[in-house]
Structure formats: C-alpha cells, structure tokens
Amino acid sequence: MNTTAEVYLWGTRVGIIHQDLDKPYASFEYDSEFLKSGIEISPIRMPLSNIVYEFPLLSGEPFFGMPGLVVDSLPDTFGNKVIEQWLISQGKSIKDFTAIDRLCYTGKRGMGALEYVPASSEMSDIDENINVSEMVKFASDVLNQRKLITLNAQEKLTYSQLVQVGSSAGGARAKALIAWNEKTNEIRSGQLNLDENYDYWLMKFDNVAKNGDHGLEDVPEYTLIEYAYYKMALDAGILMSDCRIYSNAGENHFMTKRFDRIHGKKVHMQSLGAMAHISYKEPRLCSYEMAAGYMREIYLPMKDIEQFYSRMVFNCVAVNQDDHVKNISFLMNRSGEWRLSPAYDVTYSYDVTNKWLSAHQMTINGKKSNINLTDLLMAGENMGLKKKKCKDIISQISLVVSDFEKYAEELNIREKTFCDIKKILDQNKVEV
C-alpha cells in the first residue's frame, strides 16, 4: 500500500503527493527546483507556489481525494474493473488499493505526460502482437465480472496485455492504448517505444458485452455511429485527430490517433474538469460560457475559443449530450503554453430516460435543453464572438448535420438506426 508518490513530467520531478491512511484527501507540494521553471502545469487551481495543496472538498468521486493535477491519471470505470480483476488474480485486496496505489499502478502508462514513482504494476511491457479478438473476449469477461481461470498460454498473454493497455485509458467503455503499423496491420502495446512505422492510437472495442456508459449498454453499430460523427464533424469545421475503423472478425473497432503523443513523445494534458476542479459526475456544474472563461484564464488564443464555440454548436445540433467537463482537454508544450486539444468523444448521445443523456451536461445561456438560435448567439456574445461569425458557424454546422443520412449510408449503418437518430436530429434543428 502506497501513501506517497513522486510526480514526474518529462523526466523532471514536479512534486510529491501524499495521503495518510486515515485522511480522505491527499496533499501535494511542488518540488522546490521545479518552482524555478515558471511552467504552470495546472494553472487554475494549482498555480506554482511553495504552499502545500490540500482539497478536502474533492474527497468523493471522481477525485477520490486527489488534486486536479493528477486526477486524469486515475483509471476510469473500465480501467478500474481491469485492475480489480488483476488484483483478484493476484490474491490482493481491492479495498486496500488506494488512489495513490492506482497512480503508482499507472506509473508511466497514463494519458498525457505525467508519470508516478514508485511504479507498482509488477509487470513489464509485453513486446508481442495483440490479438484483438481475444482482447475483446477478455474485455467482455472483465465487464461481466467473470472469473478468469484455467487460461492457456495464449490467453494468459492476451489478458496480461489487456491489463497493460486497457487500464490507463479513461472512460467507461472497453478500450486500449495501442501502437498500430498501418502497413503490416500489426497491433502492439501502446506502452512500447517502437520505430517510426508505428503510430499510437486509442481503440474502442466493438461487440463487448455490457459495454456502455451512464448505466446504458451500447446499441449495435455504436462504433460506426461514432465514425460517422467524426466524418460529419470534420466537414462541420471541428478539429479532430485522425480516426479509423479497424474491421476484424466481423467487428468494427473505433480508433482515434492519440494527440497526447507526437512522434512518440509525451504531451502534457489536462481535462477542464481536472484543471478547474469540476466533477464530471454531476451534470451542469459548468456552462459553456464558464468553460470559455477558463480558457481565457490560461491565455488560449481567440481562434481556440472560436473552435470551442463551434464544438458547442455541433454538440447542440448533432445531439451529443455527453458533453461534460472531462470531454474538454488542453495540451501544454514544453514552454508552458496551453492550447485546446482536438475534439474527442464526438458522437450521438441521447436518451430521454437517462439522468445524464436526457439533456446537455453543460448549459448554454442557462439552459440544458431546447436550445435555440437566441441561446447560441447569446453564448457566442458572452465568449467574445461577433454575431455574424456565430451565425456563419451555426449555418455551416446545421447544413452538414442535416445530411447525416449520407454519412450513415456510406458506412452501411442500418436504416432503422439512422432513421431513429435522424428523427431526434430533426427535432433539434436550429434555424438561422
């Protein structure tokens, strides 16, 4: 059981995090040498200072007592289930596995560039090709809490790979951090330092039993719908990393190229929720206008705020209501300059019966639903955009989304599926 971890960025120690076993929250202190760098790695709630940071109000989910600087490194829903199965297989106690233990388990394998010492996964990275079909099977086993017993040699290899590549990616759905050689179609662990023939991707698995989020199981063709939305978003002016469909054994896995890796080098990343200490588990703690305010606070250029406005409009018109604060991130270069990351998790997300998906997670002009042209224009004005620019953005996005059927047909999405979605899109049209 770990109570203390050192936090590193690009080989430099930035600080120490500690949590007493009888205390529900941790303390963090910047390293005195790192303070001299002047680089703000979490500028909103944890600016460089020689004080000891403690945040008692972050004791519950999703922070688990951890300060925002490190919380994006904590395994999320699927990652925690992978870890819990691994603990059981090792004969270890889940209840004694603390948040700092989870950071140490992540070690060097997390999203972004932060690393934790001591790394405690007790497992070296496996330099073998990944069998995607076998990994999907094990992901189903994990989500359904099936006991992983009597495994043969190949199954043990695949399960060990899932523990390594599936526990560090965020989110509730089954996914893995992989390295893909497009020329040979080989897939290996995304934790390995490989040659230039490999690029680093996040793969969301198709056809995993009980896969989903917010208590809902994914509908068939979920990955194809997300890919259709990716194509539609690009045409609507939304900046995204390259995405692909990896078809294998009748399954269509969604892949997105990692933007926290550039030529294999790690990029520091923080979600809005982590940076501003806002829980994504509680809907509507943050508005889009507030988010733009935080962007100004970290000196994002106006073109990033304009891009963020476009994403807000797209989420509204295309009915992506899983638009919470963990789905907005920022990237920092080695000079300490912040920019808006590419968009991600851009897909159709709506369910009238669901607490989270029945309305937007972030408000627009004080509203969570029934967003109209006036609301979008008022939000744009609040963000500092001119009315004509806002109208142009709304017109372009509305035109693209009105043609959703074309994107669905290109991917052979079933008629019933795209008709059900199209019906909701038509109900959310914004006339300019």
Image (tube, rainbow, N blue to C red):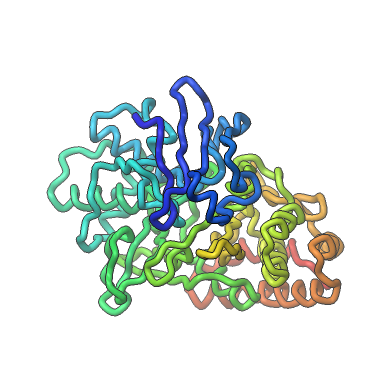
Which residue reaches farthest left?
153
Examine the image and state in which quarter residue 98 appears: top left
- Of the 4 image quadrants, the one containing the N terminus is top left
- Of the 4 image quadrants, the one containing the C terminus is bottom right
Question: Residue drawn at (72%, 77%), measured in percent from left and top?
Answer: 396
Question: Residue drawn at (26%, 70%), measured in percent from left and top?
Answer: 186
| Relative image position of residue 272 (x, y in whole percent) | 62, 52
In the rendered view, would you say 393 is above or below 360? Answer: below
In the rendered view, would you say 4 is above or below 170? Answer: above
Examine the image and state in which quarter residue 388 appears: bottom right
| Nearer to us in this view, 389 or 249 | 389
Question: Residue drawn at (69%, 51%), measured in percent from left and top?
Answer: 360
**In this view of the protein, can residue 287 be seen by the observer?**
yes
Q: Along the horizontal axis of the image, is 29 left or right of 354?
A: left
| Relative image position of residue 78 (x, y in whole percent) | 42, 45
| Nearer to us in this view, 78 or 115 | 115
| Nearer to us in this view, 366 or 416 | 366
| Relative image position of residue 361 (x, y in whole percent) | 67, 49
Q: Along the horizontal axis of the image, is 102 left or right of 184?
A: right
**In this view of the protein, can residue 76 be seen by the observer?**
no
Tally of numbered discs: 0
Examine the image and state in which quarter residue 88 appears: top left
Question: Residue drawn at (70%, 43%), measured in percent from left and top?
Answer: 285
| Relative image position of residue 71 (x, y in whole percent) | 51, 43
In the rendered view, would you say 164 is above or below 295? Answer: above
